[in-house]
Image (cartoon, helix red, strand yellow):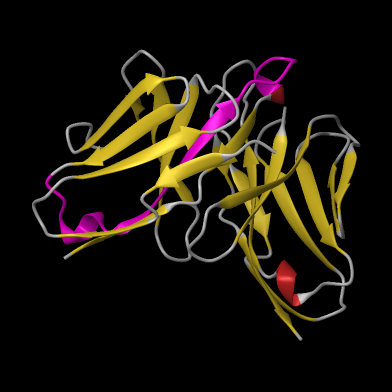
Amino acid sequence: SQELEQSPQSLIVQEGKNLTINCTSSKTLYGLYWYKQKYGEGLIFLMMLQKGGEEKSHEKITAKLDEKKQQSSLHITASQPSHAGIYLCGAGSSGGSYIPTFGRGTSLIVHP
Amino acid sequence: GAVVSQHPSRVICKSGTSVKIECRSLDFQATTMFWYRQFPKQSLMLMATSNEGSKATYEQGVEKDKFLINHASLTLSTLTVTSAHPEDSSFYICSAREAGSGGPSTDTQYFGPGTRLTVL
């Protein structure tokens, strides 16, 4: 089965700093999703990446899927307290089947 | 993006009672919905896959007689926790799968806001 490894597990940054979260898959990714979750709430869909080398942005959040399609990075520029939460990467497909898998999440705290 | 609702958002019940949680896709039809359980500071644990018009597929270790899933329509799936016990207290999240135009790899999961279950 496909496994997703996220790093770091937690991150504490000062407001205004840039940061990067990584998601590494044990198998080729056919669709990689990034979600944000505030504590005790549901998941908010941020973006989906499919093609190797693809890069997408949502406000100050940028995610990229590497060429080999086994790793994705999420980058936040000039972080703000509103960025705080848990970031989860997820994969919905393994070849032709749909098997939802998620990383363990990265907890982000942004100090004002 | 697409919207998925869950009801109730929070429920407190007595041990031994049953609790039903509803998951609805509001602006799209979902042939597949997923039910997850999340413990504090942990990732999502897939409990079961709910397919419209057929029996749910449960993950290993999840009791199907305890967690009853019904997916009666393309926009509604329900999870019933039967004879709830304190150890069933958790955060339950559903998601609905929206089909993409290019096969399974283009599908997207949209999540409900979750239901906090507390069993006394």
Nearer-the-camera pick, B5 or A99: B5
Nearer-the-camera pick, B40 or A44: A44
Is B31 part of what is drawn in magenta?
no
Looking at the rendering, the stretch of residues picked out in magenta corresponds to B83-105
- Say whether residue A4 is left or right of residue B14: right
Residue, x 54% and y 33% (percent of image)?
Answer: B26
- Say whether residue A96 is left or right of residue A52: left
Residue A40 pos. (x, y %) = 48, 63
Quarter of the rendering occupied by the C terminus of chain A: bottom right
Q: Is residue A17 above or below residue B88?
A: below
Residue A46 pos. (x, y %) = 73, 48
Is B91 part of what is drawn in magenta?
yes
Residue A33 found in image quarter: top right
Residue B95 pos. (x, y %) = 51, 37
Q: Residue furthest bottom?
A: A112
Nearer-the-camera pick, A29 or B34: B34
- Say whether residue A89 is left or right of residue B29: right
Can see residue B61?
Answer: no
